[in-house]
Every structure is written in C-alpha cells, then in structure tokens.
Amino acid sequence: MAITLHVADESTPVSRRIGLFGGTFDPVHYGHLRPAVEMAERYELTTLYLMPNHKPAHRQPAAATTDNRIEMLEMAVHNAPKLEVEAREALRDRPSYTYDTLCEINQEQPDATLMFFMGMDAFAAFDTWHNWEGVLALANLVIVNRPAASHSAFSRDLLKRQQASHGELIRCGSTGVIETCDVTQLAISATDVRRRIASDLSVRFLLPEPVLEYIADNSLYQYNH
C-alpha cells in the first residue's frame, strides 16, 4: 500500500521551490556543480542548497575537515545563481539524517515546496535510510539517473506506487512525488581527485580554480585515504 501523504490544495499560495542536494563534497568538483546548475534550472528552484554533511551515515569519514569542505564549497558556488551552501548538517556533531534536516527546513519555510535530489544508487538503498517514510511525508524526491546505477526491487516498487498515488510531476505544495531526471554526467569522482593529488598528478579542469588554490594553500589530500 502506498504511503498516505498530504498534498496542498492547488489554490494555496506556495511560491518557493527549494532544492536540497547533499553530499560529502570532499572535495567539491565539476561532477557535483554541473548537475546542480541543471537541476536548479530544470525545476525552476528558488534556491538549491548544497549540503555538506559532517558525519555521513552511509559513508566513511571525510578526508578533509568540515570547515575545509564548507569553505571549498562556498568558493565553488560564489556568484552562481540559485546555488547556496547550507551547512546545518555539517555542524551537527552526530550522523546526518535527511529526515532531521527536512523537519527543520519545513518548520522554517512552511510555504516552500521541498525537493530532495539523490542519485539512483542512493535511491536503490533508500529503504535503509533513517525514517525514509518521513522523508516522503515532508518532501518530494528527484532521482538522478546514473549510467552505472540501477533500481533495486524496493526502489522500483516504491517509484511505481508513489507515482500511481501521487502523480509523476512535482506540483506546488506536493509531497511524496518521486520524479526521475537526466543531467549531464561528468565522470569525476572525489576519490579519484584525492588520489591524483596524493600522487602529485594534475587535477586542473576537474574542479574550480579557487578550490584548487585552496587545496594547495592548505596542503589538503597529500596522503592517500
């Protein structure tokens, strides 16, 4: 049975469309930034928040410090329309849970339509997330297709059920809608960027120049992690 969720009446004056795009960003690179620009444009977002986390619940600890990662991300999105850094998850001294973040933002901006962006690989394991039902009660999901990722039995069934009960397109005031989208895929990984830096190989044109300079100035990623 599909999860029962509240959908606001279409006459409700909801104007803000807020996107949330989380990650470790260790370091941020063009593989993060180009999709972010396209997502903000395609969904006509008021703001797309890039959210570095502090203690990822599903990943190994970051190689760079939380402060380093926030500063690099702020440099990367400086003067980028609609892209902003949202550091609340990075400042939590505990594992970062999407549900907690959505609760806070929903309380702060109750008139906003919330969209949480995730890759297909993450969506395939969405049933392992903390209170995933609560996530759908607060926000819509936009699943970014990735060439090497595919559905699990759970995610395929959930997508069908939610689209059957809530529609296939996100509307103002909706929650629980799940869309899929394609964006420009750049074959860049933070793991490979760190490996190249530790091996004294060039990472130019993989990430913004200010971020490159910051990494060099702070001697980041000098050792393999």
Image (tube, rainbow, N blue to C red):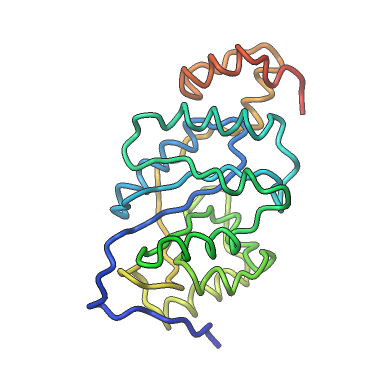
Q: Nearer the viewer, residue 119 or 20?
A: 20
Q: Position of residue 7 (x, y in %)?
A: 38, 79
Up the image or down, 105 lies above or below 209; here it is below
Residue at the bottom extreme of this rendering: 1
| Residue that extends furthest to the front in the rendered view of this protein | 108
Q: Position of residue 69 (x, y in %)?
A: 60, 32
Which of 130/30 is in front?
A: 130
Residue 199 placed where, x, y %?
A: 71, 15
> In the rendered image, which quarter contains the N terminus?
bottom right
Q: At 53% from the left edge and 14% from the top edge, which residue is drawn?
A: 213
Instruction: Quadrant for residue 60, please give it.
Output: top right
In the rendered image, which quarter contains the C terminus? top right
Q: Going 64% across and 28% down the picture, which residue do you hit?
A: 192
- Residue 95: x and y in percent read 71, 52
Q: Is residue 139 left or right of residue 89?
A: left
Along the line of sight, the residue nearer the viewer: 50 or 106: 106
| Residue 116 falls left or right of residue 125 | left
Position of residue 143 relative to residue 225, above or below, is below
Q: How many numbered discs, if any?
A: 0
Q: Quadrant of residue 11?
A: bottom left
Query: 87 left or right of 96?
Result: left
Q: Horizontally, is 22 left or right of 130 in the view?
A: left
Residue at image position (42%, 41%) is 84
